[in-house]
Amino acid sequence: RGIATLPAVLPSMSSPDGPPSPMKEKVDLAKEKAAEYAAIGKEYAAAGAQKAKELAGKVLAKDESGGYLVVNEAKARYQAIAARGAAFSKDILDKADISQEDLSKLHRIPAVVSLASLVIGLLLIFSHYNTGWVRGMMWINGEVYEAYVSTTTAELGKDGADSDVLKKYFDGCGSGLFGNGKTCALSTLCAGPTTPYDKPEKSTPDQAWCDLEDAGGLANTLLTVGLIPGLGTFILTFIFAAKEIGKVGLVLSKAESQGISMTAQKYIIAGCWIAFWGFLFVSMVAYAATVPDTLGVGLLTLEASFGVVRLSFLLVTVF
């Protein structure tokens, strides 16, 4: 029965006398669309080629003097924009009652900036050795003492009044370079007491001192490296401020003749300031993030020397 019905089905699918199959209609339609898109593509390609040819003609066109017209047009537009900008600036200055004499005083700014960079560098150097970075309460054998910590040393009590307690348990304490015998190196405290505590469970753990040593070492490294671009800002800005001096002006002129333009010199100074700013910012964040929360009793608080770094960061941001 299935064989008998097969001829009836075949004509509807592929017989040339029957209606076209849906697949054939789709194929024909696809061919028509492809031909249509190809024609459109040729039109766009021809139009693009024509536009490119016209543009190339405009770019390569020259005037009577042999100069390129497109370059001359760009110069003319730039000069027109510069003229409008100058007129706008003059109008603003006139409204603000600012004279050219007032503007001439701005040459003092580089000298002020140079002096500021020197002051900032000195503040950072002195802050390294001041035991006022963090303050907290530590304990030994249950007795609580107030600790003042720098990036490298620690002392107990105001001005090291209680630091003799550390000398009983840590050999080498009291030999700090700037502590007048009242400070103890964080590396010594991190190594642990040479004389064991009577009540170690009621004493500041060695790891707290080690964390302070690591935080201080990281901050010291970043600040020391940051002083390099800081010193660069002072020297370069000072030279730039002193360009009116004959010999200094000759040095700058020689640098400019060697290909280091005045704009490039300004970029170098700005780059030093940005690097200085970056090292200050990273050192602050790194120190604040790595110091321990406590020395055993209460929480640690950031003190004046850390505030000096923040002040330096603010000054660099301003200048």
Image (tube, rainbow, N blue to C red):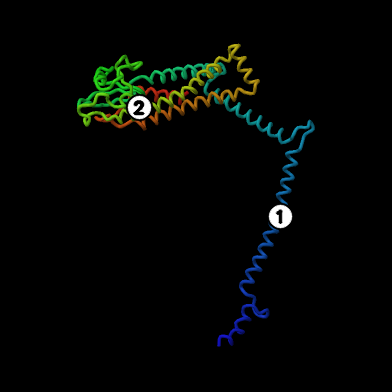
Marks 2 and 1, Cα distance to the nearest angstrom? 74 Å
Q: Quadrant of residue 32?
A: bottom right
Q: Quadrant of residue 31?
A: bottom right
Q: Are marks 2 and 1 in contact (CB under 8 Å)?
A: no
Image position of 128 (left or right of 199):
right
How many residues crowd around disc 2 within 10 Å: few (fewer than 14), some, or many (20 or more)?
Answer: many
Between discs 2 and 1, the one toward the N terminus: 1
Image position of 158 (left or right of 124):
left
Q: Is residue 305 above or below residue 80?
A: above
Considering the numbered disc 2 on the image, is that residue within a helix, a strand or a loop? helix
Q: Residue at x 64, y 68 (%)?
A: 27
How many residues crowd around disc 1 within 10 Å: few (fewer than 14), some, or many (20 or more)?
Answer: few
Considering the numbered disc 1 on the image, is that residue within a helix, a strand or a loop? helix
Residue 70 disc label: none
Q: Which image quarter holds the N terminus?
A: bottom right
Give the farthest residue toward the right.
64
**Residue wearing tag 1:** 43
Residue type (three-letter) at the residue carrying disc 1: Glu
Give the farthest residue toward the top.
246
**Given this view, does label 2 or label 1 mark the residue nearer the observer?**
2
Image position of 174 (left or right of 42):
left
Residue type (three-letter) at the residue carrying disc 2: Glu
Q: Residue at x 60, y 29 (%)?
A: 85
Q: Report x, y in % for residue 243.
A: 58, 15
Q: Report x, y in % for residue 192.
A: 29, 27
Q: Report x, y in % for residue 65.
A: 78, 30
Q: Report x, y in % for residue 206.
A: 29, 29
Nearest the viewer among 54 and 10 is 10
Image position of 278 (left or right of 266):
left
Nearest the viewer among 174 and 117 is 174
**Residue wearing tag 2:** 213
Q: Residue at x 71, y 34 (%)?
A: 71
